[in-house]
Amino acid sequence: MNARLPAAAWSRALAPEPQPPQPGLQARAIGVHQQGRTLLDGIDLHLAPGQVGVILGPNGAGKSTLLNVLGGLRQPQTGAVWLDGVPIDSRHAAALARRRAYLPQELVPAFDFTAQEVVELGRYPHRLQPAPDEAEIVRAALQHCAVAHLAQRSIRALSGGERARVQLARTLAQVWHPCPSGRSNWLLLDEPTAALDLQHQHATLATLRHWSRSRSAGVLLVLHDLNLALRYADCCWVLQDGRLQGHGAPTEVLQPALVQAVWQVRTHSVQDPAGVAQLLLAA
Amino acid sequence: MKAAPRSLRSLPPEGCLSGFARPGAADMTAKAIAAPAHLGRRGWLAGGVGAAALLAGWPRSALANPGTRPARLITVGGSLTEAVFALGAEAQLVGTDTTSLYPAAAQQTPKVGYMRQLSAEGLLALRPDVVLALAGSGPPLVLTQMRSAGVRVELIERRHEWDDVRRTVQAAGRATGREAAALELQRQLEQRWVTVRARIQAHTGARPRVLFIMAHGGSPLVAGRQTAAHAMLTLAGADNVISGFNGFRPMTAESMAAAAPDAIVTTTQSLQAVGGESAFWRRPELSLTPAWRRRHSGAVLLHQDALALLGFGPRLPQVLEQLHQGLLRV
Amino acid sequence: MNTLALKRSGAAWLSQRPSGPAVLGALALAMLLSLVWASGQGAFGLPLRELPAVLASALWPSAERSAAELVFFNIRLPRLVLAVAAGAGLGLAGALMQGLFRNPLADPGLIGVSSGAALAAAFAIVLGSLWWPEVPLALGTWPLMLMAFLGGAVVTALIYALALGEGGTRVGIMLLAGIAINALAGAGIGLLSYLATDEQLRNLQFWMLGSLGGARWEAVWVVALIALLSALLALRLARPLNALALGEAQATMLGVPVERLKLLCVLLTALVVGAITATTGIIGFIGLVAPHIVRLLAGPDHRWVLPGSALLGATLVLLADAWARTVIAPAELPLGIITALVGVPFFLLLLRSAHARTL
C-alpha cells in the first residue's frame, strides 16, 4: 500500500464510483497499520445525525485509534472518512473545529486555568465569528454538566470526576449553537465516563442523548460499559483486534454469544422493568 | 627548606626607588592653587545655565589647558601602578585595577575592577584626565567611550622583554608630567639591569632546567612559551623544560616526568593557595621529577611575589637578580 | 501540605485573582518607574534631579557637550534601552518556552538555549578570528547574532525533539537534556579556550557571566528592534498557546495549526535569545521568574502572561543592572551573577511547591 499518497485520494482512486453526499459521519474501509502491526482493518461505519453511536471492545481493540481517525486526528493508510459528504481534510481543520468537538481521554492541563477558562477555550474555533452570547454559552455549558459551582476553581485542583465534567462542558460549548449552514454538529468522546461515579455516568449519557435528540447532533462515544451502551445508544460497533465483530442496534448486537466471543465473559441478558435490555454477569 | 625563601626575600632591594627626590613640588603646588580661579572663569563661559554649567565647568576645561594642575590618573596594570609610585606621583592616582597590589598603598586606592572588565561609568565617575592601561584592557567599547568623553587613554604594549619596563616608565612619566624623573628612573634601572644581565651571561655553568608553576586557583598550571614566566626563566639563564605549547596548561604526571626539571619556580601566592611548601611537594605530578627528589635541600623551590616576578615593572632588575642567585644554588 | 489544604488555599486565592488588563497596567507602571529610577543610578553621580537639564541640553546642543551629557547619552541611555530590550526579550522567551513545552519550569537558560547560543557565538569569536579575520566579530554585531541565533535554534529543536511527547513534555527529559546541553556548552567553550588567545579567553569567561556593559547604540538598536518585533508576533500566539495547554490533540481538534505554532515558538525564542546573548552574554532566570510571577498575579491566560512577562522581565533587568553597576562602584558586577543569586532560590522554591502536584 503506497502510504505516500493522501489516503483520501488513494481510496477515491479505488472506490467504484463517487458517493452522493449523505448526511452523517461515514467511514469506508478504514485501515491503520503501524510498524508492521495492524491497528484497524476494513472498518465501515455510518452514523446519522441525531443518533448516539458507541464503539465498544476490549482493551487494545483499536477503539481510540478509530475515534482518532474519525475525528481527523489521524490519517488512515486505507479508506476515507466523510462528514456530511465532505471528506475530512486537515486543511479545513479550523472550519471543521466549528462543527466537530472532540473529548480525549484524561489529560491534565499544564497550567492553573479555572474551570470557566477551560470552557472558554472550547469557544476558540469561533473567535473570529463570535456568537452574541459567548459568556452565556460558557455559563450554560457549565450548568448543563453540573459544574457551575466550580467555575472559579483551578482545574488542576479538582477531582478526576469534576475535571471530566468540566472537559465535557468545554466540548459542549464548542458546538453549542447549531451550524449556520444547517448541517449538524458532531461530538466525539473517548471514554467520557471513565472517571465518573455512578450517578454522573448516567447523568452524562442522559445529557448526551438529550443533546443529540434536541439539536440533531451526532454523538459518537467510546465506552467500556456494555449496560450503558444498551441503555443510551442507538447503534454500536464492536471491535476486536482492529476488526469489526458486529454493528447495529445494541440490543441486537450485544448478545451473550458475541459478548463471550469478544470479551470472554459469560453474561445473561435480562430486561429491566422499563423494558431496557441489560446484561448480567454470570458466574 | 624554609631558610632559602627567607634568604631570597631578605636581600636588600637595591637601586632604590624610595630614595628619589620629587622634582617640581613647589611649582606643582603653585599650579594647584592657581587652578580653581582659572576653572571658574572657563566654566562659566563654557557651560550654559544651571546644572549644565556646573558640570561643564569640570575637568574638560582643564584638559583644554594641560599643565594647569596635576593630571588625575587611573592605572590599569600592576606594573604601571608601580611605576607611578616609583615616580612619587601617587597623589595623582585616583583609581587602580585589581592587579595593582604593590606597593601596599596601591591597595587603598579605589579599585576599578579587573583589567578586561572595566566599567565606563565607573571610570568616569573618578573624573580622570588620563587612563594608562596595559594592552588587552577592555572591553574595547569602554575605552572608546572614555576617549569620546575626552579622557586620554594610553595603551602600553607588553612583549615580555626589557623594553616593557622602558615603555612603562616613560608612559608613567608622560601621564604624570614627570618626564625628567622618569628618565632618571629609567637610567638607574638600566644600569642595574645591565649589571644583572652581565652577571647572568658571565655564568658559564650549565643552564638549570626549570619548571614554572602557577596555582593561584589551587589547581596548578605550568607555563609554556609566549608567557611572562618563560621570558623570566630565559632571562635568568635557565631553560624552561616545557617547550611544546604556548600559554598555561594543567600539569600532568607523565609530562612532568618527561620534562624532568631540576628546580621549580612559582609565585608566593601560589604557595599560599596550595597551603605551604610541604603541601606543594605532595602533588603527585611532581613526584617523578628530579626536583622532587632534592626537595629537602631547600634550594629547588624558588618563589617570588607574582606581580614582581611576572609584571615586567620597575622591580624587574631586582627580581631577576634574586632569581638568578637562587638558581645558582640549584 | 496535603492536597486538600492546597486545593482550599488555591480556591480561595483564585477567586480573588485581579483582572488581566489591571495586572498589565500595574506592570507597565512598574517598568516605567524602574526606568526612571534606573536612569539616575550609576557610578558617575548623575542623579535623577539633574536629568531634566541633561535632556534639555540634547534639544539645544551647546558647542561643547558636558561630561554629564556624554555619560548619559553614550553610556547610560543605551544601557537602559538594552536592559529593557533584553529583559523584555528574555521574559517573553521564557513565557513562550513554557507555553510551548506546557511546563512552568522551562526557561531558556535552564534548558540550555542560552548556552547553545553562547557556544555558537564563542565558536564564532575564537575560530572566526582565525579563519575570517576581516569579518568583524565584536560582540553585538550581526554576524555574531546570526551565529547565536543558529546555536539557540539548534538547541531548542533538539530539546523539543527529545522531550515533547503526546502527553506533554517529559519534564525529566527536558531538564536532563538541558543539563547535558549546558555541560556540552561548557566543555565546548573549554575546548575553545585552548585555541583562544589569553585576551579572548578572559573575554569569554566574563561573557559567560553576562553583562550589559557592551551596550553601544549600533547593537542596542538591533536588539531592541528584534525584541519589539518578536513581542508583536508573539501576541498573536497567545490564544493558540492557551489552547495548546490542553494538549496537542485537543488543540488540533480546536483547529489550532499545532505544528506551525510549535515551529513559530521555536524560531521566535531562538531569535530573541540569540540576539540578546550575542550582545550581553548569558543572563539567566529572567525567563523563569517573570512568567511565573505574572501567572501568580493574572492567571495562566497567555494574553496576559506574554506581555506581562516582557514588562516584568524588563523591570527585573533594569533593577538588577542598576544594582550591578553601583554596588561595587567604580567596578561592576556581572549581571548574570545577580540574576542567578535571585533566580536559583526562586527556582528551588518553585520545585518545592511543584512537588505538591506532580511534575
Image (cartoon, grey):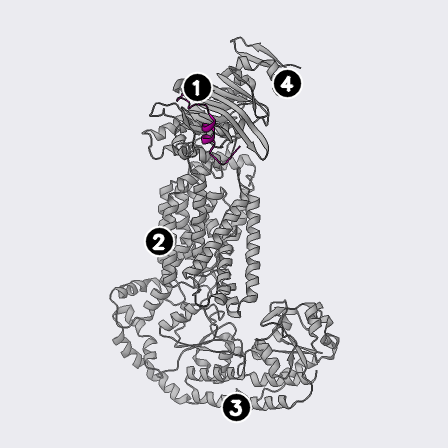
Q: Which of the 4 quarters of the picture holds residue B224?
A: bottom right
The amino acid sitting under disc 2 is Leu
Eyeballing the image, is C341 above or below B181?
above
Give the spatial CA distance, label 2 vs label 1: 60 Å
Q: Secondary structure at mark 1?
A: loop
Q: Quadrant of the C terminus of chain B?
A: bottom right
Q: Residues within 10 Å of mark 2 (few under 14, many from 20)?
A: some
Q: Which residue matches tag 1?
A: A48
Give the spatial CA distance, label 4 vs label 1: 31 Å
Q: Secondary structure at mark 4?
A: loop
Q: Residues within 10 Å of mark 3 (few under 14, many from 20)?
A: some
The amino acid sitting under disc 3 is Gln
The answer to the question of whether label 3 and label 4 lie on touching residues, with beta carbons closer than 8 A, is no
Q: Residues within 10 Å of mark 4 (few under 14, many from 20)?
A: some
Q: Which residue matches tag 4?
A: A265
Front disc: 2 or 4: 4
Q: Position of residue B328 (x, y in %)?
A: 68, 85
Q: Position of residue A55 (x, y in %)?
A: 52, 22
Front disc: 3 or 4: 4
The amino acid sitting under disc 1 is Ala
Which stretch is magenta?
Answer: A1-22
Looking at this view, is B297 or C356 the one in front?
B297
Q: Are marks 2 and 4 on the same chain?
A: no
Q: Which residue matches tag 3?
A: B188
Q: Are marks 3 and 4 on the same chain?
A: no
Q: Which residue matches tag 2?
A: C32
